[in-house]
Amino acid sequence: MLTGLLGGALIGLAATVYLLATGRVAGVSGIVAGALGDREARGERIAFLAGLVAAGLIAAAVSSPAAANPYPTAVLIVAGVLVGFGTRIGGGCTSGHGVCGISRLSIASLVATATFIATGAATVAIANHLFLGAPTP
């Protein structure tokens, strides 16, 4: 529980620092889109994304190995593509809406985040049933 609390606090701090430093919300899908298309702020966005990757690598090096994912690779690829489309349709991702939008008391972000969570729960239940044959809790 302590690691989750610390991780959440660090995410909130990083989002706050990014907003204060750039004047933009730390929504990862928007940062990725900007890194691929916006020449003006490309360097800053690539640095942000490199920091995300570096933090993951550091965490993997200093902590226990993650559990193996039980889903077929094709399912994970399709899921990733669907998440990408969903962030475009939903006007952002969980970091933009869930972390930054809710903290700014945005009603649209509250609705979007509730939709993300409900859809994610339903997807896990369906995926567990179809691919693992396990009953969902």
Image (cartoon, rainbow, N blue to C red):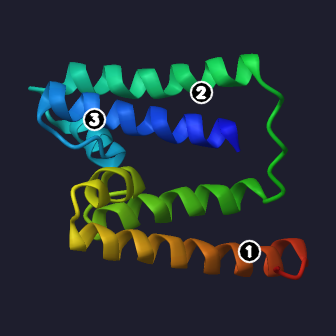
Could you tell whether 82 is left or right of 59 in the image? left
Residue 64: % across, % down: 83, 28
User: How many residues crowd around disc 2 within 10 Å: few (fewer than 14), some, or many (20 or more)?
Assistant: few
The tag on residue 16 is 3
Could you tell whether 123 is left or right of 41 in the image? right
Q: State the SS at label 3.
A: helix
The tag on residue 127 is 1
Q: Which residue is mark 2?
A: 56
Q: From the viewer's side, name the closer residue of 10 and 67.
A: 10
Could you tell whether 7 is left or right of 76 in the image? left
User: How many residues crowd around disc 3 within 10 Å: few (fewer than 14), some, or many (20 or more)?
Assistant: some
Instruction: Name which residue lies at 88% across and 82% down.
Output: 135
Q: State the SS at label 1.
A: helix
- Mark 2 or mark 3: name the one nearer the start of the chain: 3
Question: Amino acid type of disc 1?
Answer: Ala
Q: State the SS at label 2.
A: helix
Instruction: Name which residue lies at 17% across and 24% down.
Output: 21
The image quadrant where one finds the C terminus is bottom right
Residue 69: % across, % down: 80, 51
Q: From the viewer's side, name the closer residue of 104 and 71.
A: 104
Residue 22: % across, % down: 14, 29
Question: Amino acid type of disc 3?
Answer: Thr
Could you tell whether 62 is left or right of 44 in the image? right
Instruction: Name which residue lies at 79% across and 37% down.
Output: 66
Circle nearer the viewer, 2 or 3: 3
